[in-house]
Image: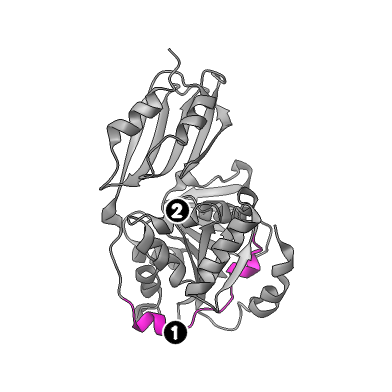
Amino acid sequence: MADDNLDWILDDLSPDLDTANAKPVTVLTGFLGAGKTTLVNRILAEEHGLRIAVLVNDFGEIDIDSELIVGVESGTVSLANGCVCCEVRDDLISAIDSVLRADDSLDAIVLEASGVAEPIGIARTFTSPAYRGRIRLDGIVAVVDAEQLPAQTEDPATRDLVYAQIGFSDLVILNKIDLADRSRIDEVRDFVLSRMPAVRIIETERAAVPYEILVGSGSFDPDDPRWSQSHEHDHDVGFVSWVYRRDGLFDSAAVESAIKLLPRSVYRIKGFLNAADEPDHRMLLQAVGMRGEVVPFDEWGDRHPTTALVIIADGQQVDRAEVEAILDACLVQ
């Protein structure tokens, strides 16, 4: 992680959570696989002494150490460090109300937005007069994949969405710099700054960002002209997702190689692999763009060994049969 670009940000954004009764809300935005969930995991596990409610779309994405869990009730996991993790099902407003009713001693709220959602519509929910005095939008933080961004902005299916996610942020976290060379990192920085000259950028690996950067920054400006000059777009309709299931054994190395052969219309793959080289273990597959990795996760135990992968792609361009054929070729005969 590049530490030399953090000191001045910490000086300016040091949290002052007691200055108002309203709970500060941070929205994490960014395209699929950028590293938002990794960042959320850090918030939940870190000993920061704050009571933070983290709202997520899917508990399955969150890797919560069982030793940290002190209670589970009605879609909410309570943790030993005082944080709570809440699943947002169909209604964000209901989730917010539930969190506020359940715990009035919260210091802050962090929302991990869907990777295919624009932040502006979500942010306007938090600025609704109905929440005046209860919550306040504190900042919008965009997590960007340093290696994948150029391709995402060249793809007509993702370009406008990625522009919107970056364009409405108060802070950009340039993540996964360990996977890109310096020229690529500089290219991405120049790209972001050419569109938002005043935005602050943090370079990091594995979303290793101090919580002070995210919570209580007070960086959101409701008078920013970006809000009055914009309108919300519905980008979710352009994406399609499905679950690829197979009972046979896979060659892990072949799957990692096959990721590079998938069409560009496939953006994200995540799930568990039944691998011939590790028959006793569930192997976690994560792929973003043309980059993929298969690593041991846990033992199958009493579960039936099977491969189940969630695939997210461009609904207008993807050929599902082609994608599944490429993956099927990795089955061990």
**Between 275 and 280, which is closer to the camera in this rendering?**
275
User: Percent position (x, y) of residue 324?
Assistant: 34, 30
Q: State the extent of the magenta-drawn residues as a range.
A: 209-230
User: Percent position (x, y) of residue 98?
Assistant: 40, 63
The quarter of the image holding the N terminus is bottom right
Give left or right: position of 7 versus 86: right
Between disc 1 and disc 2, the foreground one is 2
User: Percent position (x, y) of residue 57?
Assistant: 41, 53
- Which SS type dominates the magenta stretch? loop
Give left or right: position of 113 versus 291: left
| Residue 212 belongs to the span the image colors magenta | yes
Label placed on residue 8? none
Image vertical order of residue 214 relative to residue 326, above or below: below
Label placed on residue 151? 2
Query: Can residue 106 be seen by looking at this rendering?
Result: no
Label placed on residue 224? 1
**Between 106 and 87, which is closer to the camera in this rendering?**
87
| Residue 130 belongs to the span the image colors magenta | no
Point 40% across, 73% down: residue = 126
Point 50% across, 73% down: residue = 194
Q: Secondary structure at mark 2?
A: helix
Point 70% across, 76% down: residue = 8
For the residue carrying disc 2, how many other residues have a C-alpha within 10 Å: few (<14), some (14-19), or many (20+)?
Answer: few
Give left or right: position of 289 versus 171: left
Q: Secondary structure at mark 1?
A: loop
Residue type (three-letter) at the residue carrying disc 1: Asp
Give left or right: position of 24 versus 43: left
Which residue extends farthest top?
333
Query: Can residue 7 be seen by looking at this rendering?
Result: yes
> Of callouts 1 and 2, which one flags the residue occurring earlier in the amino acid sequence?
2
